[in-house]
Amino acid sequence: MGSYSILIGLSVAVILSYLFDVVARATRVPSVLMLLLTGIALRQAADYFNFTPNIPTVVLEIFGIIGLIMIVLEGALDLKLTRDKAPLSGAPFWLLRLCWSCRPWLLRCCCRLT
């Protein structure tokens, strides 16, 4: 796989992302969902035609992590925090604090079971 193939692949991905964004506005289906389904379809097509790209696992992991971060950040941009939702936004913090404070007790219980 040469550098031209990589550039063409990235360009097609950007164009598909833009087209899916336009379609998402019209159909109210998230563009991320359409991109995920396209990735699944491409993987199935690659398996059907016995095509195996020579991409190192480390590169795939990095792209996966970057993709997940971008999905989460895009979802965070759509959040609208108002004063009436303030009690709800504090609940996860207190739940996390409770779990963190119970951590030593949970570890002791789990260590006794093994």
Image (spheres, helix red, strand yellow):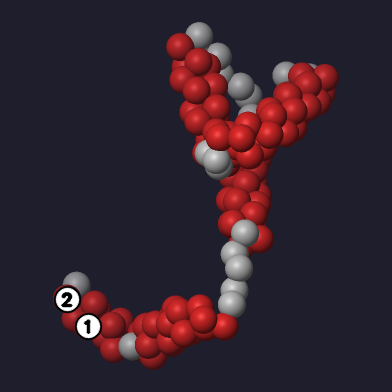
The residue closer to the viewer here, 12 or 18, is 18
Q: Outermost residue, left direction?
A: 113
Cα separation, mark 1 vs mark 2, equals 7 Å
| Element on which disc 1 rests | helix
Residue 105: image quadrant is: bottom left
The residue beneath circle 2 is 113
Residue 108: image quadrant is: bottom left
| Element on which disc 2 rests | helix
Where residue 92 sits in the image (x, y, percent)?
Answer: 44, 78
The residue closer to the viewer here, 17 or 11, is 17
Decide: marks 1, 2 in contact (CB < 8 A)?
Answer: yes
Residue at the image position 47 percent from the left and 85 percent from the top:
87
Where residue 74 sits in the image (x, y, percent)?
Answer: 64, 54
Label 2 neighbour load within 10 Å: few <14, some 14-19, many 20+: few
User: In this picture, is 38 found above or below 87?
Assistant: above
User: In this picture, is 55 found above or below 107?
Assistant: above
The residue beneath circle 1 is 109
User: In this picture, is 43 found above or below 45?
Assistant: below
Asked if residue 13 shows in the view, the reply is no
Tag 2: amino acid: Leu
Give residue 33's mark.
Answer: none
Q: Name the quarter where the C terminus is drawn.
A: bottom left
Tag 1: amino acid: Cys
Where residue 69 sits in the image (x, y, percent)?
Answer: 62, 55
Where residue 104 sits in the image (x, y, percent)?
Answer: 34, 88
User: In this picture, is 14 found above or below 71?
Assistant: above
